[in-house]
Amino acid sequence: PILYLDEENISKKLKCIICLAPAINPRVHRGCNTVFCELCAHELLLSSASLGEDQAQTTCCPTCRQECSGDSLQPNDLIKKLLDEVSVYCSNKANG
């Protein structure tokens, strides 16, 4: 996991709406610009796929309730670049 030096001061607009952490490999819903991390977006799309064909439901954005699909959750380079500028602890911090 990435440990940010000052995570509480990272804008909420750069955090995943599901896990509330800074978005890793951010995806943005093109209908409402809600930010998801890649893992949460993947899990959101899998949640309806696991129901099977007889119970198929449309996955909806938790913010705007519009349909979510692989096409509507697009990578966002701007958010990724903004998060790349945030200071993080070295992944070997525990080792000195």
Image (spheres, rainbow, N blue to C red):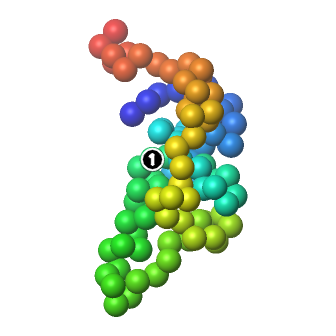
For disc 1, the marked residue is 38
Amino acid type, label 1: Glu
Q: Does the rendering let one see residue 49?
A: yes
Question: Is 53 placed above or below 8 here?
Answer: below
Q: Does the rendering let one see residue 8?
A: no
Residue at image coords 46%, 59%: 70
Residue 37 screen position, x and y as percent: 49, 46
Residue at image coords 41%, 74%: 48
Residue at image coords 50%, 77%: 58
Residue at image coords 60%, 56%: 29
- The quarter holding residue 82 reads top right
Question: Is 50 placed above or below 81 here?
Answer: below
Question: Is 81 placed above or below 69 here?
Answer: above
Q: Is residue 85 left or right of residue 96?
A: right
- The quarter holding residue 93 reads top left
Secondary structure category for the residue under label 1: helix
User: For this rendering, which residue is in front, 2 or 30?
Assistant: 30
